[in-house]
Amino acid sequence: MFQIARFNTAKYAAFQIRALSAGPMLAAKAVAAKSKKVVSPEAKALEKELKKEKLTLAKLAAKVKKVEESEKEKKTQASIERREKKALKPYKKLSPLNVFIKENYKSLGSLKDASHKWTELTESEKEPFVQKAEKLNAENLKLYTPKPVSPAPAYARFTKANWVSNEDFSVASKAAAEKWRQLTKEEKDAYSPKPEEWEAYRKAFASWREERIKLYASKL
């Protein structure tokens, strides 16, 4: 981004210098030369140089515009990605303190004062905020549904199917790993998720992602 900014600044500076100095100077010389009754070789040369300078300025202006548009597009994309990242975060439950601060920090003067005031409340005084937090969390969890879980990999499925429940965890893990190593590739592939499972997951994730982004936008 900094490289683009430096490139942009350098090109724009070059464009300004040429536009404010060389161009007008050549134009003035060309007009002065043309004022003579006979078009001299000098006037023709100046006309040619002026056209060349205008073309150079046009090219510089086009490059500056292209870099500016590219930089603007990258900033826009970065902003979209930041918002999407926030939208897809797991829902973080509100605490009674969160509810109290939201309702009282302005009237109490600051966030710090509101937090301090909370510590002075009795349990009975805190209870309404406990109930509000529980209610809000229950309502929000209906909206902020968890992200769909992708299909389990082959080894995880094999382990689940062959786990010996009455064995020590480390012993059962080693036994499952040894059995897995003895399987052929075809036998291992049989435990892999089916294409239709992945397709169902992709659709579920796309739908979930779209809904979460809409929900986040509605809360802004």
Image (tube, helix red, strand yellow):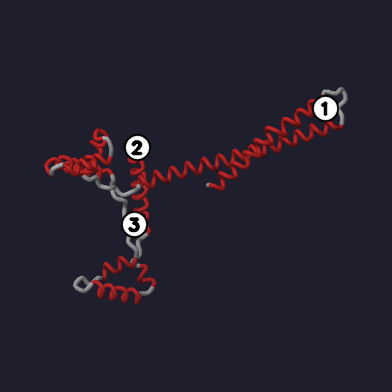
Task: Answer with left or right where residue 125 lies relative to residue 93.
Answer: left
For the residue pair 186 and 70, the one nearer the viewer reads as 70
| Image coords of residue 32 (percent x, y) | 80, 26
Q: Amino acid at mark 3?
A: Ser
- Between label 1 and label 2, give the one nearer the viewer: 1
For the residue pair 113 and 17, the one nearer the viewer reads as 113
Q: Amino acid at mark 2?
A: Leu
For the residue pair 181 and 141, the one nearer the viewer reads as 141
Seen at 29% across and 47% down, the residue is: 91
- Between label 3 and label 1, give the one nearer the viewer: 1
Q: CA distance from mark 1 to mark 2?
A: 64 Å
Q: Give the labeled residue for mark 1.
A: 33
| Image coords of residue 161 (percent x, y) | 26, 68
As drawn, the label of residue 187 is none
Q: Quadrant of residue 217?
A: top left
Q: Give the labeled residue for mark 3.
A: 150
Q: Does label 1 or label 2 sit earlier along the sequence?
A: 1
Q: CA distance from mark 3 to mark 2?
A: 29 Å
Q: Does label 3 or label 2 sit earlier along the sequence?
A: 3
Task: Answer with left or right where residue 146 lies relative to residue 135.
Answer: right
Mark 1 touches mark 2? (CB < 8 Å): no
On-image quarter of the C terminus: top left
Q: Mark 2: which secondary structure?
A: loop
How many marks can you see? 3
| Image coords of residue 39 (percent x, y) | 86, 27
Seen at 64% across and 37% down, the residue is: 61
The vertical placement of 86 against 33, above or below, is below
Q: Quadrant of residue 47?
A: top right
The vertical placement of 16 against 199, above or below, is above
Q: Quadrant of residue 184?
A: bottom left
Q: Give the labeled residue for mark 2.
A: 220
